[in-house]
Amino acid sequence: MKVIIKKNQQEAGVEGYKVFKEAIQNGAKVFGLATGSTPVTTYEEIVKSDLDFSDCTSINLDEYVGISPDNDQSYKYFMNEHLFSKKPFKKSYLPDGLAEDPEEETKRYNKVIDDNPIDLQLLGIGRNAHIGFNEPGTSFDLETHVADLTDSTIEANARFFEHVEDVPKQAYSMGIGSIMKSKKIILEAFGAEKADAVAKMIEGPVTEDAPASILQKHPDVVVLIDEAAASKL
Ligand code: GLP
């Protein structure tokens, strides 16, 4: 793991952008993308830049179950707002939160990932070290699946909703098995509330209790964090 520590999220955004730029220069065509407050500054720097994704494909990590793409809490809506409306991709995939048959939807999404091997996967991390919505205890071998969100994740994500009861209880998520197939991974984490998760990921044992710890086994991972998130290393 290559660990880069920046003063704050703003400065880290520039670094995140550089990782995307270098990937494009090296021929990357398929980008795995993430939502949440973490990747926002990286997306801002990408939007300001002259990077061109019109010949590229994006595949998002996850989407809430039961939420329509027009809902402003959907990850589809987030991606349009922060990236796609300003930097369109040739094709952008997200799980369909309204899919009628969840099993078919996970199969469809696994095929999308198999047909479009990811060159660079961007990740955030949950306070309990989840990645995507692979909560502690999830098998490292899983591919796309429907995940039950833990109470701590529901509580953490409640800040984006009017009431905590509005936070969906389930989500489609790429599995760790899918994430680990990506050629290169960049994981970003900012703020003191991520410090425990970051320490477990980098220094802890590789265990399904701290899903991000599996990244220690991936050959090409950049961990981009701010000083607060690095405070327990
Ligand atoms: C959610 C997402 C994750 C994200 C995490 C952290 O649970 N499924 O992909 O990394 O939250 O979110 P934030 O970046 O807002 O702290």
Image (cartoon, rainbow, N blue to C red):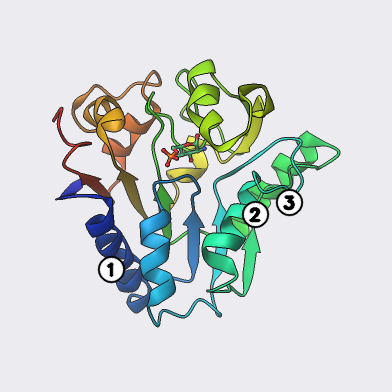
User: x%, y% of residue 60?
Assistant: 56, 52
Q: How far apart are marks 1 and 2 (CA)?
A: 25 Å
Where does the C terminus fall, quadrant-wise?
top left
The residue tagged 1 is 18
- At a point 52% along the width and 59% down the height, the residue shown is 117
Q: How far apart are marks 2 and 3 (CA)?
A: 6 Å
Q: Do the residues labelled 2 and 3 touch (CB within 8 Å)?
A: yes
Is 155 positioned to the left or the right of 48 in the image?
right
Say whether disc 2 or disc 3 marks the residue closer to the N-terminus. Answer: 3
- At a point 48% along the width and 62% down the height, the residue shown is 31
The residue tagged 2 is 77
Say whether disc 1 or disc 2 marks the residue closer to the N-terminus. Answer: 1
User: x%, y% of residue 23?
Assistant: 34, 69
- Circle 3: element type: loop
Q: Residue 135 carries which label?
A: none
The residue tagged 3 is 69
Mark 2 crowdedness (10 Å alpha carbons): few <14, some 14-19, many ≥20: some
